[in-house]
Image (cartoon, coloured by chain):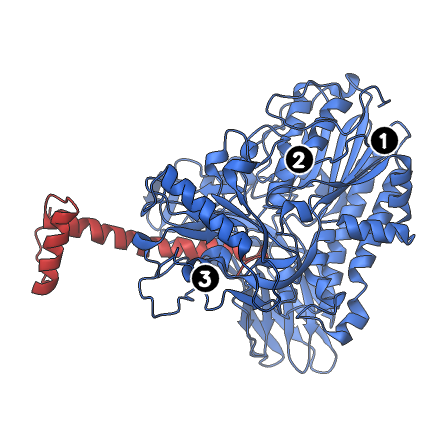
Chain colours: A blue, B red
Amino acid sequence: MNRRDFIKAGAGAAGLLALGPRADAVMRTTGRKATSRKILILGFDGMDPKMTSRWMSEGKLPAFKRLAAQGGFSPLGTSIPPQSPVAWSNFIAGTNPGGHGIYDFINRDPKTYIPTASFSSTEGSTKTIRVGNIVFPLKSGTVRNLRQGKAFWQVLEEHDVPATVFKIPANYPPVASRQRTFSGMGTPDILGTYGTLNYYTTETKYVNEDIGGATVHQVYVIGNRVDAKLPGPKNSFKPDRPDTEIDFKVFVDPTNAVAKISIQDQEFILREKEWSGWKRVSFPLIPTQSVGGICMFYLKEAHPQFKLYVSPINVDPGRPALPVSTPASYGEDLEKKFGPFYTKGLPADTSALDNDILDEEEFLQQDGFVLEESRAMLDYELDRFDAGLLFYYISSTDQRQHMFWRLLDEKHPAYDPALAKAFGGTIESTYRQADEILDRALSRIDKDTIVLVMSDHGFNPYYRSFNVNTWLRANGYLKLQNEFKEEDLDLAFAGTNWMKTRAYGIGLNGLYINEKGRESDGIVATGPDKDNLVREIARKLEEFRDPKTGEKVLARAYVARDVYTGPYVDAAPDIILGFNRGYRISFKSPLGRVPKDILEDNKAKWSGDHMGAAEIMPGIVLANRPVAAERPALYDLTATIMDVFDIDKPKEMIGSSIFKKGDPR
Amino acid sequence: MSQDKIKIDKVLLDKVRKYADMSGYSSVEEFVTHLLEKEIAKIEEADSEEEIKKKLKGLGYIG
């Protein structure tokens, strides 16, 4: 089944199925003749200005230092809030969130209060016909990118400037374009989730439901053989949309630490601690249709316990079941050249480390594959980069800071001295790897190419968790049906008494008023009642201090109407939580839970974060041309791109070029 | 429309009558139907909520 059929069928992967942009038949922009200018932009997610600056001055980042000396280095103003989909959307659209409508990883449906993913929406086929036991769709399902506004590469296309944009976050499905683009953060696995690994073990394994992202299978070795199932997407061809699965077998050598895996028509042998590389799998839907994906196997232990990790099943870039590139042939071409590669939005398997399924070393091996693939493909793109814009994204800088902060910071509640000895230098070595990537890129470009290095936000420790709904309850803004029962259920706002609730938190930084006419059970009138309540809650939040440390939990509680401009301001949360250094929303709050305590220590491996006030969480920008802007921000880089190609900035874009007028381009 | 009857405790029925009237419903039936539809919708949405949560958890940021 090809991608078009899969999408048309509305089958599988949580119904994610839609006709994405497809422009194979149309030639790419012919702008190669229109411009000889070139700009290379390397996007390192989450690189922090303080750490970059420190390691530059210590001589550990020589390429960064060289670039800074050649042009400039500056903190880069981030988005409110500094979450990657929001921040990268600021850059993509050249606006603040009021201009692109992405405010958080998580939005909510005001009619049900149920959390939803903010960057894409999926609707299965609504018109179907049932023949016997099979449901045939009559109309395609759709998956939509919810980011509004025009992407900078679409503007370049209108001016015949070619662009290649690789894995920029918040571009799933990739917006329609003839430019070469590959989707990034936000791209699901073939189950339609943002990553669900499978782990097969004879050990009784506790899975931390607070982290999720993993399915653990209890298995048995009987006669040296393990019988197991690999779960696949839902089968929308069947009336009750059952889950699909593939049976597979593992033959464990009774004496040596080796196993043979037999899945579909493939057999391969893994030694203990060995990775399989990418394997193709195919889930049958109906006799003539199936959907495929790619995954990696890792034999963690053969004896005495059996432990097998299988990565989330990624969309196969060679035969994509979901729209991951423009033109569709771009991903297929890359796959022909490099073989299968990671397509899931955030490919580092942080859930595996969080759930103790992979240890630190194994996690770094896995994310190392991601980095290796990225490096190889960047080399390839650089070698054929002859005009226009090349944007390239690296995720490891962000993901490793999330997971390893606890081991470079003795104050962290999850600090472990023994692990710190082995892995305390991981973040520094990741910055050094970023430096190597930059150095390699600089050696492959000519002197006329403009180079920008950027990150979307900085980083800080995540010591303490804030349960916003518990705080709202303690302050009388959120009421439960039964006030004597602590409400820690797993459902969003289960037990909330909406008729008496005036405000609620959802997402990583969002706080909403329960507004009459907007929320289904809203009670606060639009106008002065709401405005006064917003100001009152924002003031109290900014005054709130952590009883344990005496520190303010929030550096800022932004009122949306004060900080956003543009046509999509009405979609914003009413208040955006800008945390103080060391604080973040708890793992439980974003989906609407109301745990017992307002504040808790964060003992998770996910130990660094960036949900702070924008003022304390800037990213970085470096350029090989003098940076004239005193306080550049993400949307200024979009204006800079327009400036480089002498394109009049579209009226929606709010930034200014970081370069001085008249300076050589 | 089917006319099946259901039994409701008298004290509860009195309350239902009172609040149906106070809330501006034209009849007890309309009030009860509305409440039941709302509750059933919540239950029906529970599955999709679970699916949404499963989808989001892989981001790593949430629980």
Mark 1 closeness class: few <14, some 14–19, many ≥20 residues within 10 Å: some
Q: Quadrant of the N terminus of chain A?
A: top right
Residue A626: which quarter of the image?
top right
* Residue located beneath label 3 in the image: A470
Q: A51 or A436, which lies in front?
A: A51
Report how far apart the C-alphas of labels 1 and 3 lie in the structure: 49 Å
* Residue located beneath label 1 in the image: A626
Report the number of discs.
3
Q: A524 or A237, which lies in front?
A: A524
- Chain of the residue where label 3 is placed in the rendered structure: A
- Chain of the residue where label 2 is placed in the rendered structure: A
Picture coordinates of residue A99, whole percent (x, y)? 56, 31
Say if mark 3 contacts mark 2, CB within 8 Å: no
Name the element at disc 1.
loop
Q: A494 or A393, which lies in front?
A: A494
User: Could you say which disc has been placed on residue A91 in the image?
Assistant: 2
